[in-house]
Amino acid sequence: MLVKNNNHVCKAKLSLPEETLYDLADLFKVFGDSTRLRILCALFENERCVQHIADELHMTHSAISHQLRFLKQNKLVKARRFGKTVFYSMADEHVQRIFNQGLEHVQEEIK
């Protein structure tokens, strides 16, 4: 049995490899922290260095660096070095789409 919704097709009996499901669960865990979500929001418009993000979010440089390291390890942000400064940006357009889809879902009214 197939369930069709927009352009997505999902099999009723999920046949994805267990490792793929674990990777997907890990991805969603990354979005499970409000500080990381705030950092991603800060990076939506353009790249920023740690200090600019820390100033914007009223947090310490250390706290932002820690979360950026985690986001980078999980391939949600990328880094670019310019001299001594490292600039962070979204890894690709998927990250913003995932965020926006989740936001749309939590803001929709239940009918």
Image (cartoon, helix red, strand yellow):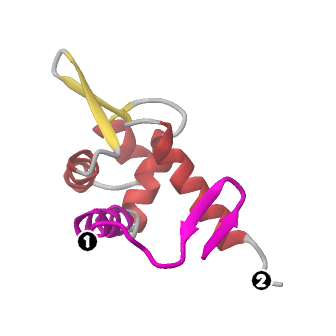
- Horizontal side of residue 101 vs 65, given as left or right: right
The residue type indicated by label 2 comes to: Ile
What's drawn in magenta, residue-wise? 1-30
The local secondary structure at tag 1 comes to: helix
Q: Are marks 2 and 1 in contact (CB under 8 Å)?
A: no
Q: Position of residue 65 (x, y in %)?
A: 22, 48
Q: Mark 2 highlights which residue?
A: 110
Residue 17 shown in magenta = yes
Report the quarter where the C terminus lies. bottom right
- Horizontal side of residue 87 vs 57, given as left or right: left
Q: Position of residue 68 (x, y in %)?
A: 27, 48
Residue furthest to the right in view is 111
In this rendering, the label closer to the viewer, 2 or 1: 1
Residue 80 shown in magenta = no
What's the residue at 25%, 45% (across, down)?
72
What's the residue at 20%, 54% (across, down)?
66
Q: Mark 1 highlights which residue?
A: 18
Q: Position of residue 57 (x, y in %)?
A: 43, 52
Q: Is residue 109 above or below residue 17?
A: below
Q: How many marks overall?
A: 2
Sequence-wise, the earlier of marks 2 and 1 is 1
Report the quarter where the N terminus lies. bottom right
Near mark 1 (Cα within 10 A), the count class, few <14, some 14-19 or many ≥20, is few
The residue type indicated by label 1 comes to: Glu
Q: Kindly report the distance in space between the C-alpha atoms of the residues bearing marks 2 and 1.
A: 32 Å
